[in-house]
């Protein structure tokens, strides 16, 4: 399997992460052989949503941000969901965790509203990425180049726009996580 021996962190926020953007990448990574660890703001279970408004599933938070370091993982996935993404970017611990992946040159993937965390972590300057269209101005204001494409890869950073892009997103994250450390990804974040 492409990702045997790799451990990937996937973020989850209580009452706000988009269910399909959490579940589909997690399943794809596991099917590719990765160990996937759900990292969240609080211990216990986190409720996800469908379309930002409707309750969806409940998922176990494996570890909290206080218990982890980017050094332990081979890659990071940041799902969307407007409320979930906003809760994550408001957490100093979560943003420090995200920055750690860039300092170590490890691949990072974000979909839909997930790139808000990248803006808040101050790691988009000089990068090309995509997101849900309403984040385009935020990305540009943070020094990034926003494009309207299904999936964009920039030196180990994989981004997609919305749930309709999940097939391409999941395929590309497996490819990037299999490659591992990207020297061009290293930043003094």
Image: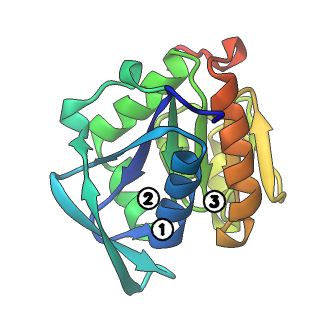
Give the alpha-carbon distance from disc 3 to disc 2, as whole Å: 11 Å
Q: Quick one: label 1 or label 3, which is nearer the N terminus?
A: 1
Q: Are marks 1 and 2 in contact (CB under 8 Å)?
A: yes
Q: Quadrant of residue 184?
A: top right
Category of crowding for the residue at label 3, using alpha-carbon neighbours closer than 10 angstroms: few (below 14), some (14–19), many (at least 20): some
Secondary structure, mark 3, is helix
Residue hosting label 2? 85
Give the alpha-carbon distance from disc 1 to disc 2, as whole Å: 6 Å
| Mark sitting on residue 144 | none
Image position, residue 138 (x, y; %): 61, 52
Looking at the image, which residue is at 54% across and 41% down?
118
Category of crowding for the residue at label 2, using alpha-carbon neighbours closer than 10 angstroms: few (below 14), some (14–19), many (at least 20): many
Residue hosting label 3? 135
Residue hosting label 1? 81
Q: Residue furthest left?
A: 43
Compared with 149, 67 (above or below) is above
Give the alpha-carbon distance from disc 1 to disc 3, as whole Å: 12 Å
- Labels 3, 2: front one: 2
């Amino acid at each position: 399997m492409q990702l045997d021996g790799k451990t990937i962190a996937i973020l989850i926020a209580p009452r706000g992460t988009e269910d399909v953007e959490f579940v589909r990448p997690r399943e794809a990574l596991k099917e590719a052989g990765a160990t996937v660890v759900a990292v969240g703001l609080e211990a216990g279970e986190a409720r996800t949503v469908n379309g930002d408004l409707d309750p969806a599933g409940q998922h176990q938070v494996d570890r909290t941000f206080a218990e982890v370091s980017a050094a332990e993982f081979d890659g990071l996935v940041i799902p969307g969901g407007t409320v979930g993404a906003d809760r994550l970017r408001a957490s100093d611990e979560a943003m420090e965790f995200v920055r750690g992946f860039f300092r170590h040159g490890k691949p990072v993937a974000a979909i839909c509203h997930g790139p808000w965390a990248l803006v808040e972590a101050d790691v988009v300057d000089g990068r090309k990425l995509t997101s849900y269209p309403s984040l385009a101005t935020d990305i540009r204001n943070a020094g990034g180049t926003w494009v309207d494409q299904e999936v964009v890869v920039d030196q180990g950073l994989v981004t997609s726009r919305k749930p309709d892009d999940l097939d391409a997103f999941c395929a590309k994250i497996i490819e990037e996580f299999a490659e591992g450390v990207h020297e061009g990804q290293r930043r003094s974040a």
